[in-house]
Image (cartoon, rainbow, N blue to C red):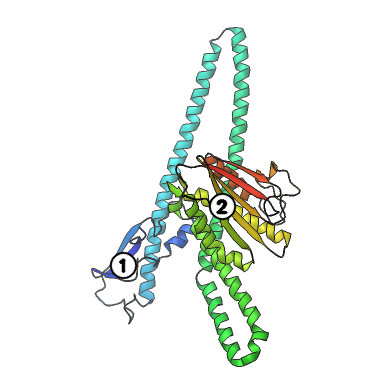
Amino acid sequence: MNEFGGVHLYENGLRVNPYGNQGNDWLDMNLSRARSPEERPSTNTSIGITRIKDSKGLLQQKTDRSGFIENEVFHEIKTFCQDAMDWMARKRLEIAERKRAADRARTSSESNVSKEKVKEQISKLRTNERIEMEKVFVNYDKARESEVKSLRAEVQLYRTLSTAGITAATFSHESRGNPLKVIGQAIAAIERRGKKGLGDNYDSVLSKPVQMINKAVKSLAVLGTATLKLISSQKRRISRVEVHSVINSIIETFEPFLKGRDIELSIDLSNGNPYLRSTEAALESIITNLLNNSVVAIENANAKSRHINIKTEIQENIIIITVSDNGTGIKGISLKEIWLPGQTTSPNGTGLGLTIVRDSVLDLGGNVRANRQGLLGGADIIVELPIIGK
C-alpha cells in the first residue's frame, strides 16, 4: 500500500505520472481522512483507478511530462473523483452506523432478558432466601449502573481527545504545506537581500532574528510531522513492537523541537532488543506524553540548563522505562491525583497526558508510578511493561 496506494490516473488506456505515485496525494485523500477519519479511504488503505477517454484532447500534459496542466477540465475531473469518494465514505458510514445501532439494541435487549431471567429465578426461592437475594441483586444493579455512568464519562473524555486530535491533524497537514513553505522562502529571501544590502552590518542587524524565525519554523514542522505520525493507522495494528526502536524514532522526530527550546535530551538504553506484542501507537502515546510533560515542567521551571533523560533497564521479563527532567517536579497535587483526567497544576495544561499514560500502561499489562523529585531534580515517571523477548 505504501508503494501502490492512492488513486492512479489513466488517459486513453495509458498511466499518467505522477498521479497515485508514492507521496502524490492529488485528491487530498489523507487530508479528508484527517478531518473525518471514520470509514474514509487514504493512500495507505486503498487503491483506485480513474480512467479517462479524451478523444478531443481537452487534457494537456505539462512540457516535462509531470502530469496535466491544471486547467478547468482537470479540476472538474478532480472534483468528480473527490465527490465519488465522499459518496463512498457516506455509504460506508451509514452501514457502520446501522451496525452500531443494531449492536446497541441487541446488547440492551439481551441485558433486559438476562435481568428478567434472574428475577424469575429469585422469585422461586424461599421467602428468606428471596429477600436476601433481592437485596444483593439491587446492590449489584446499582453498582453496574454506576460503572456504566463512569464508562460513558470516559468515552466522552476520549471523544473530546479525538476531536482535539483530528483538529490538530488537520492543522498539521495544512501547515506542512504552503504556510511553512512560504515562510521558509520569505525568510531565505530576506537573508539573501539583507546580506546583499547590508553587507558587513547584516550580522549585527538581521542575523539573529532570521535565525530565530528559522528555528521556529523547524519547530512547527516537527509538530506537524509528529502529529501526523501519531495518527497513522498502521501503528494501531497489533504486532511485534521493539521498545528501543520506538524510543529512538520519537527522539529523532522531537530532536529539532527540543533543540529549539535548548533542551538537552540524553538516553541510557539497556543492552539487547526488548520487544512486546502490542500496537506501536500505544507505546508511542506513553513516551510522547511523558516527553510533553517534561517539556512543560522545564518551561515552567524557567531553568538556565534544561535536561531530559530517558533510561531503560531490564529485570527478568519486565522493561523499566524512566523519564526524568529538571523541571518543577510534582507540586501542589497528590501523587494519586496526577493520574486523574483534568487534574493539572500547569496553567495551560489539559490534565489528560498522564491519564493516557496510565490507561495505556494498564492496557499493556504494566504499572506506572511517579517520584516528586528524582534523578535530575524534577519528576521521575517510571513505567514497567512486560516483554516477550530481550
Q: Nearer the viewer, residue 111 or 365?
A: 365
Give x and y (percent) for residue 149: 61, 36
Rendering quarter of residue 180 = bottom right
Inter-mark Cα distance, 2 to 1? 41 Å
Give x and y (percent) for residue 289: 59, 53
* Secondary-structure class at tag 1: strand
Q: Is residue 210 left or right of residue 38?
A: right
- The residue depicted at 63 percent of the width and 75 percent of the height is 212
Give x and y (percent) for residue 375: 67, 52
Q: Earlier in the sequence, mark 2 or mark 1?
A: 1
Mark on residue 9? 1
Badge 2 crowding class, 10 Å Cα cut-off, few under 14, some 14 to 19, many 20 or more, is many
Give x and y (percent) for residue 175: 54, 68
Q: Badge 2 is on which residue?
A: 287
Q: Is residue 212 left or right of residue 114?
A: right
Rendering quarter of residue 69 = bottom left
Rendering quarter of residue 359 = top right
Q: Is residue 237 left or right of residue 220?
A: left
* Secondary-structure class at tag 2: helix
- The residue depicted at 56 percent of the width and 67 percent of the height is 256
In the image, residue 81 sits, relative to residue 360, either above or below, namely below
Q: Amino acid at mark 1?
A: Leu
Q: Is residue 6 left or right of residue 273?
A: left
